[in-house]
Image (cartoon, rainbow, N blue to C red):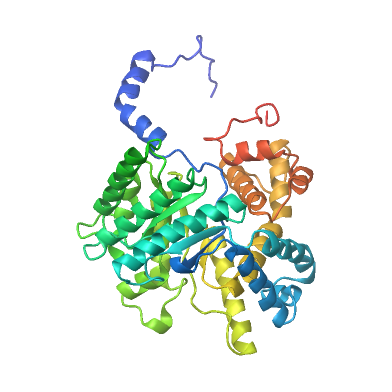
Amino acid sequence: MNFSPPTTEPAPVLGAAHLQRLDNVLADTDRLLAAAYPGDAGTRQPVHTVYIPADRCVPALPAHWGREGLAAAAAQGSLTDLAQLAGLDADLAAAVVPLVEAKLRTEPIEDLRLDFEDGYGIRPDPEEDTHARQAAAAVADAVAAGTAPPFIGIRFKCFEAATRARGIRTLDLFLAGLLAAGKLPDGLVLTLPKVSTVEQVQAMVYICGQLEEAHGLEPGRLRFEVQVETPQLILAANGTVPAAQLIHHGSGRVSALHYGTYDYSDAVQVAAQYQSMEHPAADFAKAVMQAAAAGTGVRLSDGSTNILPLGTPGEIRSAWQLHARLVRRSLERGFYQGWDLHPAQLPTRFLATYAFYRQGFDAAARRLDTYVRKQEGTVLDEPATARALARFVHRGLLCGALTDTEIEQGTGLTGSELAALAHPKTAVSPLTEKVR
């Protein structure tokens, strides 16, 4: 059968009026996507948070923890021995160990939280008032001396009825003390624990606004993390997911969702000996958190393990292996931050983290180079995959596992080009010509 070619060129039947109708119908969707899902900012996220009781904070604490971490490794052999115990082969250990040793000497704590909640307990009001003022002074002194971690702040008591007034007063005193000493630290972090409802987050938004007004701060300056420690935040009585709702009712102030391993495990009645970051109940809660935060720019943190590298040599080695494995497990599942509770956990935190990025770098770099140069390779990567590869490499750069020189040699991308590919919504792209 022969077909005759059409005598005229086919023309579209949908015109400007149809498109205008769609623009009108989808205007709310467009606004929602632009405002509520801006994507990750591409700025540095700490790889961990260290919690200490608020009354134990001194400006020299980070350096002390670094020395203690190095001493713990040396007491059992060396950092190289510990790297092998954590599963690193000889070549990977040779690359990672010098980086970790330098890290423990120069910046052993990336994010420090002075704890007025579980780690502090219930104290007489005058005593907690004193410690709130002392904590502010210690943070201000550390910032002035250049010894403060890049991120630092407090966890105050939760907004449940029994502790609400006390938590707000501690926050009030702490901020007043910081501002009396100067401006707020750039890396100030506030942590709201044991959140059960969206209304508690809205209450924190209100408190932040009042504090900003009272102290003459720029509106929106105060942001806070939400600790996910109750099943009510994962699934409410009416079947909704408050963990997702609170982000969008937080007026842009919610910076992160942190999983609380042991409070959450207890709340869903997991027996104490089975409470763990890798329990199925934990994985379910964290999967909900991950979906809730996707695209919003709100970051995620896994919890902690309370199995510390202490005791007999066998107990220490077992705890280190567990910690390194759990850190790696979190990273593989898209949780790039976790909690550390003891100086001896720092070596395995950084060994496992740096190994994660360095182990995956060569393959990611080859695929990025192929994608940017529009060459054919063994893997056909789409733009979404290229973004994921770029984000992986960019995170490795920001945490210190990779260097600018390594990245440019491996991918052909400068730091700014890599950031633009990794976070196209928030970065001005210099890649336009390169990827054409």
Q: What residue appears at the point 36 percent right and 60 percent down from the top-left corner?
A: 156
**Which of the 4 image quadrants contains residue 214?**
top left
**Which of the 4 image quadrants contains residue 47?**
bottom right
Q: What residue appears at the point 61 percent right and 90 percent down from the top-left corner?
A: 312
Does residue 72 appear left or right of residue 209 in this picture? right
Viewer-nearest residue: 344 or 240: 344
Task: Check the image and report above or below for 268 versus 387.
Answer: below
- The reply to whether residue 26 is visible in this rendering is no
Task: Check the image and report above or below for 153 versus 369.
Answer: below
Task: Check the image and report above or below for 17 versus 62.
Answer: above
- The reply to whether residue 252 is visible in this rendering is yes
Q: What residue appears at the point 41 percent right and 33 percent down from the top-left corner?
A: 34
Residue occupying the far top of the picture: 7
* Picture coordinates of residue 206, whole percent (x, y): 28, 45
Task: Check the image and report above or below for 382 versus 258.
Answer: above
Viewer-nearest residue: 14 or 114: 114
Viewer-nearest residue: 133 or 213: 133
* Picture coordinates of residue 328, whole percent (x, y): 59, 66
Q: What residue appears at the point 33 percent right and 54 percent down from the top-left corner?
A: 243
Viewer-nearest residue: 17 or 412: 412
User: On the rendered image, what quadrant is the C terminus found in?
Assistant: top right
- Count all numbered tags in the image, as a single digit: 0
Does residue 223 appear left or right of residue 249 in this picture? right
* Picture coordinates of residue 137, whole percent (x, y): 48, 56
* Picture coordinates of residue 69, whole percent (x, y): 65, 72
Does residue 312 appear left or right of residue 215 in this picture? right
